[in-house]
Amino acid sequence: MSTLLIDQISKRYEKKRWALKDISLRLDSGVLGLVGPNGAGKTTLLRMLATLLTPGNGTIYWNGQDILKRPELLRRELGYLPQDFGIYPQLTAREFLTYIGELKGLRGLHLKRRISTVLEQMNLTSSANERLRTYSGGMIRRIGIAQALLNDPHLLILDEPTAGLDPAERVRFREIITSLDGERLIILSTHIITDVEVMATEIALLQQGQLLWFGSTDALLGDAQECVWSLTLDADDFERLRNRYHISTVLRRGREITLRLVSSARPHPNATSVEPTLEEAYLFISSQIPNRKEAIPIK
Ligand SMILES: Nc1ncnc2c1ncn2[C@@H]1O[C@H](COP(=O)(O)OP(=O)(O)OP(=O)(O)O)[C@@H](O)[C@H]1O
């Protein structure tokens, strides 16, 4: 089993703002869903774990080894799909994977076998000899994951892997991730809570560069118990409530409105407590700290 230990890392790109502040996490095998609003620091953290960016403070250990001092120890075992993954449109999928595989130090028959395996895993075998310029957005995403899997990595980092996928591609992608071996650590960032619900064993919430919450998806649901409410009211009452609470769903029938909202206290005498969805639990936890627009200013 592999272990990734993130020890109090911080980063600022500009003098006056933290992009990440004192992040500590211990991760073993499984799938971690990294979620948070735009600018929360997800890509910054993932690029550090992929040894492409150095933290200002703190250390990252992979199986007990400091990867800031010896990045090559992790790189050998790393697969990375960056957010801005680029391809060479004139190459076929097989040529592209051969090129990336050789960059990763794979050779000969072993490389050929790995290419066949990842093409099969990504359901791309039948299009392996077509040029990448003919691929759909979903197929490009799958080629991105295929190249990340080539070296059979123990740490797989996927930055917004489902962005731009249509619903059918997204379902297929979730199946692929859940079918990957349980012995590796997979970290994926996403804005889509359902992705986390289906794929992740643990979830980390980043907000304004800080780790707001970390634990299992069940624990997140547990923390939002008695904090999600269902309520039916008329349009005037709705107008009074809507700016005071985080509303998760609204169903209108004429002037009658049924809604669900998150709140630590009963928001209305007629409100009844309901089981939270993971999205509502996320909304609830995120609403627990003041919503500043920018990363945390340095005092
Ligand atoms: N190269 C850079 N130079 C300056 N500031 C940066 C740079 N990259 C990121 N930032 C800032 O650091 C903070 C964190 O950005 P980051 O891209 O890590 O967030 P994110 O959670 O991945 O966002 P998104 O969901 O939009 O991809 C933001 O305030 C962002 O503006």
Image: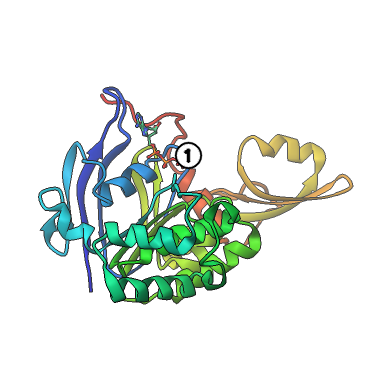
Does residue 271 appear to the left or right of 196 in the view shown?
right
Find residue 204 and report its image quarter: bottom left
Identify whether 131 is placed above or below 152: above
Q: Nearer the viewer, residue 232 or 246?
A: 246
* Residue drawn at (35%, 39%) of the image: 209
Does residue 220 appear to the left or right of 79 in the view shown?
right
Does residue 192 appear to the left or right of 108 in the view shown?
right
* Residue drawn at (28%, 68%) of the image: 154
* Residue drawn at (40%, 62%) of the image: 97
Identify whether 19 is placed above or below 109: above
Task: Specify the quadrant that holds the C terminus.
Answer: top left
Mark 1 burial class by Cα count in 10 Å: few <14, some 14-19, many 20+: few
Identify whether 176 is placed above or below 144: below
User: According to the image, label 1 marks what residue?
Assistant: 38
Q: Position of residue 133 (x, y in %)?
A: 56, 51
* Residue drawn at (12%, 62%) of the image: 64
Indicate yes or no: mark 1 CB to ligand 1 under 8 Å: yes
Residue type at the position of mark 1: Asn
Q: Which of 286 and 81 is in front in this view?
A: 81
